[in-house]
Image (cartoon, rainbow, N blue to C red):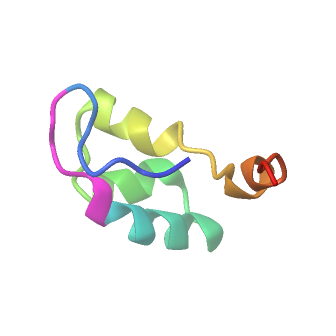
Amino acid sequence: MIIPVRCFSCGKPVGQLWEEFEKRVSEGESPKKILDDLNVERFCCRSVFLGQTDLIELVSKFKKS
């Protein structure tokens, strides 16, 4: 739901790259090209970006009242 500050596997900081990645993907650019431009080379770090799904709206529906 929320992008981690660091990669789960290697510990490389990746959180600061999320906004740029999300903006460029929404403009229709290829995720592979974006990650190459941002110098995200490791497979573990790439999986953090490619596996991210924004579920905040879905989870907020099940909030206890």
Residue at position x 51%, y 70% from top?
24
On the image, the x and y values in percent for residue 25 come to 57, 63
Q: Is residue 28 left or right of residue 4?
A: right
In front of the other: 37 or 7? 7
Q: Which residue range is magenta in the image?
A: 10-16
Magenta stretch: dominant secondary structure:
loop
| Residue drawn at x 16%, y 29% as measured from the top left | 10
Picture coordinates of residue 26 (x, y %)? 63, 69
Query: Does 37 appear above or below 10?
Result: below
Relative horizontal placement of residue 3, taking residue 43 as reference (left or right): right
Q: Examine the rendered structure and indicate whether residue 21 appears above or below residue 1.
A: below
Please state if 57 lies on the left or on the right of 19 as rendered. right
- Position of 11 with respect to 64 (left or right) is left
Confirm whether the magenta stretch covers residue 7.
no
Counting from the top left corner in percent of width and height, residue 30 is at 54, 56
Closest to the observer: 35 or 59? 59
The outermost residue toward the front is 65
Which one is nearer the viewer's eye here, 48 or 31? 48
Disc count in the image? 0
Task: Name the residue rendered at 69%, 49% in the picture.
Answer: 55
- Location of residue 58 in the rendering, given as x and y in whole percent from the top left corner: 79, 50
Q: Which residue does the image show at 36% across and 52% down from the upper left?
A: 35
Magenta-span inclusion, residue 13: yes
Q: Split into 4 quadrants, where in the image is the C terminus? A: bottom right
